[in-house]
Image (tube, helix red, strand yellow):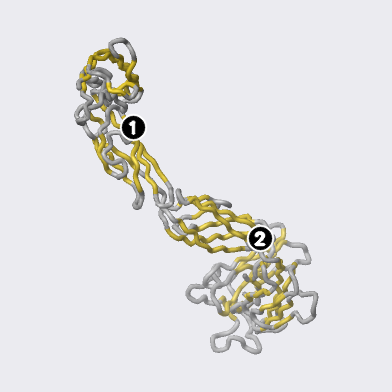
Amino acid sequence: MYEFDHSATDIDGDSIYYELCTPLDGGSAGNPQPVPPLPPPYQNIIWAAGYSTQNMLGGVALTIDPLSGKLTAVPNIQGQFVIGVCAKEYRNGVLLGATKRDFQLNVVPCPNITVASIFNPDVICGTTTVVFQNLSYNANKYFWDFGDLSTLTDTTSLFSPTYTYPDTGYYTVTLIAYSPIDPSCTDTSTRTFHIINDYTVGVDFTIDTCNAFVNFYDSVITIGTTVNWSWNFGDNTTSNLQNPVHQYSDAGIYTVTAYFISGDGCIDTNIFTVNIPYKKIIVNATASPDTVSLGEPTTLTAVSVTNVSFSWQPTAGVTNPNVAITMALPANNTTYTVTVTNAGGCTATDIVFVKVTGAGCAEPLIFVPSAFSPNSDLQNDILFVRGNVIKSMYFAIYDRWGQKVFETSKQENGWDGKFKGVDLAPGVFDFYLEAECFNEEKFFKKGNITLIR
């Protein structure tokens, strides 16, 4: 920016008003500065193309304050320019006269300014050796004072030096940058920083091998307080929690990176691995069809990860309870539970419900044979209560004198025609049956059984 004070004073106290005006031509192209000067009268100059009284600098406006006479411009073209300023004298609003001042304005490039600049962290962690970065410009010589009060040799003229301090603490470094144009022109920069002891964070973790969960923990081993955490679990997932819990989707060895930042701005990084031995077990059980008529089978299917064993419960009516796909013949509404187990003993379960239609708690679903022949021919030797709808029961047999010769509360226990280990003679016996079915209905029956030998 160009500024110049063109103000004038009047001994009579008259008012002065300032304005730009066209300069006078006192020479010629062949003799621009005649000696001695040519006598008046002088003519106004003839402006070159693009220039005028309103645009004397040919690019940006030149202005003058009409009351103070302050001339202001921000030239954007280098060169020599002729300027005219008129000071008009007024008394009681009447123009008395004017004085014109012509002068030459030379616009040249501004000289380069020397600036000293230092960059280094505000906090130096775990080392007393500091590398200083010199960001100065328009300078060719430098002087550093590292602010080490324990010595007088803590100076250098290197561009970007390194210095080792005797201990932790606060230090102020000073840089003086010298101008290549004028060595007496300098700029000075100072920077204060803090050297502190090392900040180290320990990492620990526990693994839930069956569910692939890992609990991560941090602990500051040296001085400092952690204020920022950043965990990268090695499977494209991250966390900013202090002690995160992460579940891996597959087995494998993962490289975990943990970044910690202390309240002083120190950073510590931990890189370690976690071994996930098993993929989390998930099992899905289905039945097809899931609604069957009494006596109709269904297919039970369990879908899970590889290398696991299967176990179906209940096993009654199940063809093979230890395979993923098996047949079942439910006697009533049944909830089947499948359990899968891997080599590490980890388990997962799922259930599937099969509805049985047509099931009841009456004959012929419950049946007691009217005769049997316990003669060891393996044909009808044992008398059982028949039916697959029975949940619980009580069954008793009496001889013709009313003596109880057999009783049981388990359907799998049958009568072999003996009483106290002795074969009974052929004859007719009475029985009493009380049962509760899976549909919670009750069944009662009395009748006769013929023992044949």
Q: Which residue is mark 1?
A: 335
Residue at the location (39% across, 41% down)?
Answer: 349
Residue nearest the observer in this picture, 304 or 262: 304
- Can the viewer see residue 293 in this picture? no
| Other-residue count near label 2 (Cα within 10 Å), few / some / many at <14 / 14–19 / ≥20 | few
Instruction: Say if mark 1 contacts mark 2, CB within 8 Å.
Output: no
Instruction: Report the side of 428 relative to 1 (left or right).
Output: left
339 horizontally vs 225: left or right = left
Q: Amino acid at mark 1?
A: Thr
Q: In front here: 335 or 374?
A: 374
Residue 121 marker: none
- Residue 357 % position (x, y): 24, 25
* Residue 446, quarter of the rendered image: top left
Helix, strand or loop under label 2:
loop
* Left or right for 207, reference 113: left
Question: Is residue 50 something that shows in the picture?
Answer: yes
In percent of width and height, residue 193 lies at 70, 67
Q: Which mark is residue 221?
A: 2
Q: Nearer the viewer, mark 1 or mark 2?
A: 1
Name which quarter of the figure residue 402 lies in.
top left
- Residue displayed at 25% across by 17% down: 362
Q: Secondary structure at mark 1?
A: strand
